[in-house]
Image (cartoon, rainbow, N blue to C red):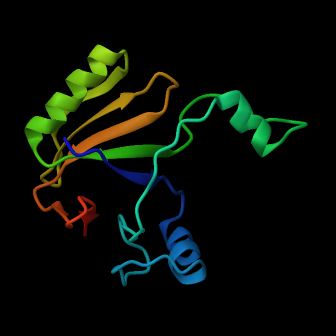
Amino acid sequence: MNKITCICLGTRNMKKALEFYRDKLGFKTDCKESNPDVVFFDTFGTKFELFPLELLSRDINESSPPTGSGFAGITLAYNVKSKKEVDEVIELVRKAGGVIIKEPQDVFWGGYHAYFTDLDGYYWEVVWGPDFKYDENGLLKF
């Protein structure tokens, strides 16, 4: 199985967020709209890192590390090449002790997905899309 990740950030204001990332920071996208329902940016690849939470908190602010829990509007996406692979990944997660939040199911846009939380409570979407295409490096293309 290819393990391909995208980082999905929730935003309260798509127009402002798009302006920030595309127009001000120069993130590349084919999106020409000013207020789309969703936008994907081209990135040069992603590394997934695990780092002890306590150390990460102290790295952010030594004297007053951030704390708290709950959904912060961020999910990680695990993109796969078939519906069957969504089911397989969810079974692996289940066996590994992750919590299945949403069982695999068809999505209104034609895809198939599920959600789980990992052992630290981070939300992941496992997703297949009928129009997903991958480049020669196995990276998702839009």
Position of residue 13 in the picture relative to residue 93 (left or right):
right
Q: Residue furthest right?
A: 63
Instruction: Name above or below for residue 20 compared with residue 37.
Output: below
Instruction: Name above or below for residue 27 compared with residue 103.
Output: below
Q: Position of residue 20 (x, y in %)?
A: 58, 74
Q: Position of residue 51 (x, y in %)?
A: 60, 35
Q: Position of residue 40 (x, y in %)?
A: 36, 67
Rendered residue at 23%/58% (across/down): 138
In which quadrant of the rendered image does the C terminus lie?
bottom left
In which quadrant of the rendered image does the N terminus lie?
top left
Instruction: Name above or below for residue 74 compared with residue 141.
Output: above
Quarter occupied by residue 131: bottom left
Q: Residue furthest front?
A: 137
The front one of 2 and 71 is: 2
Position of residue 25 in the picture relative to residue 59 (left or right):
left
Rendered residue at 21%/22% (across/down): 91
Position of residue 47 in the picture relative to residue 70 (left or right):
left
